[in-house]
Image (tube, helix red, strand yellow):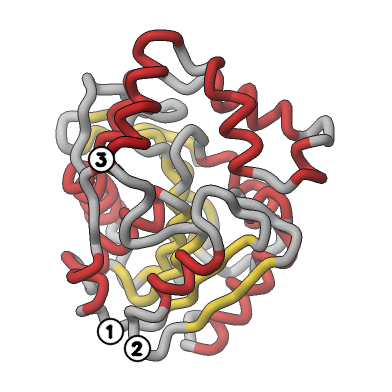
Amino acid sequence: MNTVIEVNGVNIHYKLEGPENGPALVFSNSLGTDLRIWDEVISYLPKNVRILRYDTRGHGLSDCPKSPYSMGSLVRDIEALMDALKLKNSLFIGLSIGGMIAQGLAVKRLDLVKAMVLSNTAVKIGNRQIWEDRISTVESSGMKVLTTETMKRWFSNKFFESSKVRIYANMFERQPEEGYSGCSYAISGTDFYTPTSSLRLPTIAIAGSEDRSTPPDLVRETCDLIPGSKFNLIKGAGHISCVEAPKEYATVLSDFMKEFGHV
């Protein structure tokens, strides 16, 4: 079911699938993409799960408020959406900025997040200057100027040279400039080192060996902050590892759900 709901004054587009009494999975996507990046992964998951996907504010079919955004506002969006849909005790899967949202939500609402998958993410991504430069470029020249550079950071060389990369280049180029800059501001102002270090819940981190945005060592450093967490490296995949290796990614999720009893 595709639909839209207003939360925090913003219309958020979401898709809810699976049996109402199934264990909940919530997917939060990366900067410059929308909920479609999870399509293939979901096709490999067990059919008894309740799956929520949504477009972050400023992305996909959700509203695009005026930039800048704060990480707190992004966390409140999904918090309000899950409350409205009465989804609790979820496995929250967040990729890149989605992984930052996962950390922020877990610190705030452990009743909503039973376990986390921190995918291709970190407690802090980049630095303020990097994000200010990208924001300035987008605001002055548009999204297409960043396409080639972004696709090379996101994907392995093999995927970048394939025809499939055009799908995600188109997705990126159609991203509202205001939404990209708004979420970039949110990332630039976020450092979750201390709050994430306080978390105690089942967690697995996923990294791609060819990820140039959040390299494996950076992902592992975040993983190590949470006692008992696990680290999984997907060889040959880049930053959007769910796109390059959907079957392996789904297997990691399914095995993790079995381990902590989310079945």
C-alpha distance separating marks 2 and 1:
7 Å
Amino acid on which disc 2 is placed? Pro
Closest to the observer, 50 or 169: 169
In the image: residue 39, left or right of residue 190: right
Tell me if mark 2 has few (under 14), some (14-19) or many (20+) residues whose alpha carbon lies within 10 angstroms of its own.
some
Q: Which badge, 2 or 1, is on the more N-terminal residue? A: 1
Closest to the observer, 169 or 263: 169
Callout 1: helix, strand or loop? loop
Amino acid on which disc 1 is placed? Arg
At horizontal 31% and vertical 70% (from top left) the residue drawn is 113
At horizontal 66% and vertical 64% (from top left) the residue drawn is 249
Q: Which residue is mark 1?
A: 200
Q: Give the label on residue 227, or none.
A: 2
C-alpha distance separating marks 3 and 1:
25 Å
Residues at circles 2 and 1 in contact by the CB criterion of under 8 Å: yes
| Residue 33 shows up from this direction | yes
